[in-house]
Amino acid sequence: MHNKCVLVTGGAGYIGSHVNKMLNRQGYETIIFDNLIYGHREAVKWGKLIVGDLSDIKQLKEVFDKYEFGAVVHLAAYAYVGESVKNPEKYYYNNVSNTLNLLHVMLEHKVNKIVFSSTCATYGEPDTVPITEKMPQNPINPYGASKLMVERIFKDYSLAYGLKFVVLRYFNAAGADSEGEIGESHDPETHLIPLVLDAAGGQREDVKIFGSDYETVDGSCVRDYIHVEDLANAHLLALDYLNNGKEPDYFNLGNETGTSVLEVVESARKVTGRDIKATISGRREGDPAILVGSSKKAREVLGWKPKYEDIDTIITHAWRWHENKLY
Ligand code: UDP
C-alpha cells in the first residue's frame, strides 16, 4: 500500500487547485504548499494549506518532518512568458533554484517520487506539429528554459539518486472546474481566455491580438488549449504510474488541435452571445507561432483520455466560472 499523503506545491494556483481537488476526490490526503503570491487561499477547499516559499529550506524541512509523503506534485512556479523575457532572474531563482531546494529536502527525507509541471514552451519553435516528446527542445524564452533545466536536473538526479519522476509538458491550460467550484483567476491577468471573457463581460474594453502576421491560418498565434480538468486528471494517472514502480518519463498533454487567437475570440462570441472587440496589436516577445502537441504517448502509456476536447466546451466552463467568480 502506498502512502496516500501527497505534497502539492503551488496547489493554490489555477492548475494546482484542480489537481488538489481531484486528488482529494480520489482519496488522497493533500498538503498544499503555496506562497500565495499568485495562488488563492479560497482555491484550497480540500486538504491542508501551508503558506510558505520553496526558498525557505528550513520551513520545507519542517513540513517534511511533520508529514510522511508518498509523493510530491510540483506545480509551484512563475509562468508568465513575457515577464520571463524581461526579468529572467526571477524565473531562474524561483523555478530552478527553488526546485533544487525541494529535491534536496525530498531526498533527505527519502521521498523519491515527483510529478512535475513542465511546459510546451520547452520546445521553442518546433519544426513540425504536432510536437512529440522526442522532438528537440530549444526554448525561446526564459520561462521555457527554466522548466527545461529542471527536466535536466531530474534526469541526472534519477541516475545518481534514484529519483522517480514524471514530467508533464502542458500545452495551454484552459477552462474551469466543471462543477464551478474553482477556476482561473490571475492578478495581473495575462492569459488569453480570461481576458477575452473580461471583454465579453464588460470589465475590459477590448482584447488585444498579439500579432497578425504569423504564418498561420489567420495570422494570429495558434495554441493547443486543454481543459484544466483533463490536465489535472493526468497527474493522478502519473502518480499511479510511479506507484506501480514504472521508470521516469516525459508526457505531452494537449488536445492535438490548434486554435488561433482569433478563433478563440470567435468561440467566446458564440458561447457568451456577447460582442467582443478584438484589436490587432504587435507581437508579444517570446511567443512561437504555433504550438500543438501530440498526446499519443500519454494516451497509450498513462491511459489518459481527455473528456472536454472542443474549444466551445472549454470556453463554456470558463465563462460559467467567470460570471460567478468566487475569488
Ligand atoms: N494572447 C493575445 N492577447 C492577449 C493575451 C494572449 O493575443 O491579451 C495570445 C498570446 O500571444 C498567445 C496566446 O494568446 O499566442 C495564448 O497566450 P496565453 O498568455 O494565454 O498563454 P501562453 O501561450 O503564454 O502560455
Image (spheres, grey):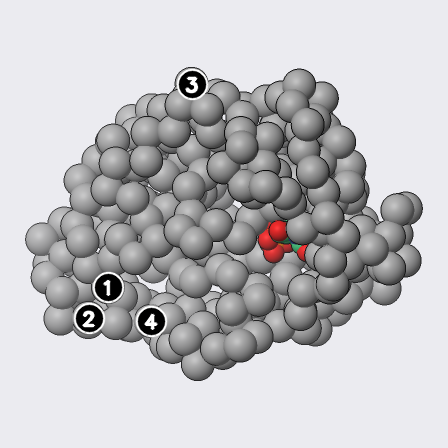
**Local SS, label 4:** helix
Q: Going by the image, does 135 lie left or right of 13?
A: right
Which is nearer the eye, 14 or 261?
261
Instruction: Kindly indicate the quadrant of the structure image that contains residue 23.
Output: top left
* Residue corresponding to mark 4: 98
Ligand 1 lies under 8 Å from the Cβ of mark 2: no
Circle 1 crowding by C-alpha within 10 Å: few under 14, some 14–19, many from 20? some
Which is nearer the eye, 36 or 108?
36
* Residue corresponding to mark 3: 179
Cα–Cα gap, marks 3 and 4: 33 Å
Circle 3 crowding by C-alpha within 10 Å: few under 14, some 14–19, many from 20? few
Cα–Cα gap, marks 3 and 1: 30 Å
Upstream in sequence: badge 1 or badge 4: 1
Query: Where in the figure is residue 259, as x and y percent of width and height?
Result: 77, 40
Cα–Cα gap, marks 2 and 1: 6 Å
Q: Amino acid at mark 1?
A: Asp
**Local SS, label 1:** loop
* Residue corresponding to mark 1: 53
